[in-house]
């Protein structure tokens, strides 16, 4: 059986843009297909990542880092063990470190994420 990571097009090795470089987040997102996820840039030890999603991710957590989600396009529901948080464009939610969560993209969704550099996007 394939590992969960094999279902996603996730790359954490490079940065698409360097410091002082101008870029268009909406254009980058528009050019991708679901389950694409890349680091746009690094800011003060945090990765600014962009994900294009459609459907369910999986239950996971990050033991040592918080995770920030901001919806640029579409709808993202973040299922927690005790509730569901629904995000539409322009809305955001920080998931505290150690909290189990299950992102559900309701149709094609483009999501900006901020995480500690070095995080494993699929969870610990």
Image: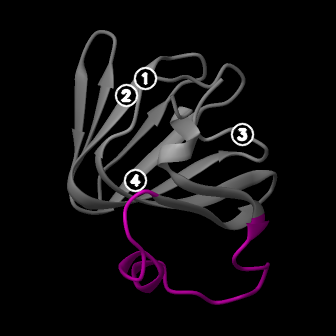
Q: Main secondary structure of the magenta part?
A: loop
The answer to whether the residues at label 2 and label 3 have Cβ atoms under 8 Å apart is no
Query: Which residue does the numbered mark 3 point to in the structure image?
Result: 119
Point out the tag, 2 or 1, that comes first from the N-terminus.
1
Give me the disc on residue 123: none
The Cα–Cα distance between marks 1 and 4, rounded to whole angstroms, is 19 Å
Give me the disc on residue 70: 4
Residue lying at 60% horizontally and 22% vertically, measured from the top left: 97
Query: How far across and how far down the image is residue 83, in percent?
Result: 24, 17
Point out the tag, 1 or 4, that comes first from the N-terminus.
1
The Cα–Cα distance between marks 2 and 3, rounded to whole angstroms, is 17 Å
The residue segment tinted magenta is 14-35
Does any portion of residue 88 appear in the rendered image? no
Vertical order, 110 against 29 (above or below): above
Q: Quadrant of the C terminus?
A: top right
Residue lying at 75% horizontally and 61% vertically, measured from the top left: 43
Query: Which residue does the numbered mark 2 point to in the structure image?
Result: 102
Q: Is residue 65 magenta?
A: no
Does any portion of residue 33 appear in the rendered image? yes
The Cα–Cα distance between marks 4 and 2, rounded to whole angstroms, is 15 Å
Residue lying at 29% horizontally and 60% vertically, measured from the top left: 109
The answer to whether the residues at label 1 and label 4 have Cβ atoms under 8 Å apart is no
Vertical order, 41 against 117 (above or below): below
Q: Residues within 10 Å of mark 2 (few under 14, many from 20)?
A: some
Q: Secondary structure at mark 3?
A: loop
Query: Which residue does the numbered mark 1 point to in the structure image?
Result: 59
């Amino acid at each position: 059986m394939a590992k969960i990571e094999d279902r996603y097009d996730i790359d954490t090795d490079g940065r698409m843009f360097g410091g002082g470089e101008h870029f268009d987040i909406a254009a980058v997102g528009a050019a991708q297909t679901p389950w694409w996820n890349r680091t746009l840039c690094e800011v003060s030890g945090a990765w600014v990542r962009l994900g294009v999603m459609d459907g369910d991710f999986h239950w996971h957590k990050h033991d040592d880092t918080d995770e920030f989600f901001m919806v640029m396009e579409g709808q993202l529901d973040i299922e927690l063990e005790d509730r569901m948080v629904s995000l539409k464009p322009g809305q955001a939610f920080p998931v505290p470190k150690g909290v189990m969560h299950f992102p559900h993209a309701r149709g094609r969704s483009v999501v900006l994420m901020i995480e500690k550099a070095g995080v494993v996007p699929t969870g610990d």
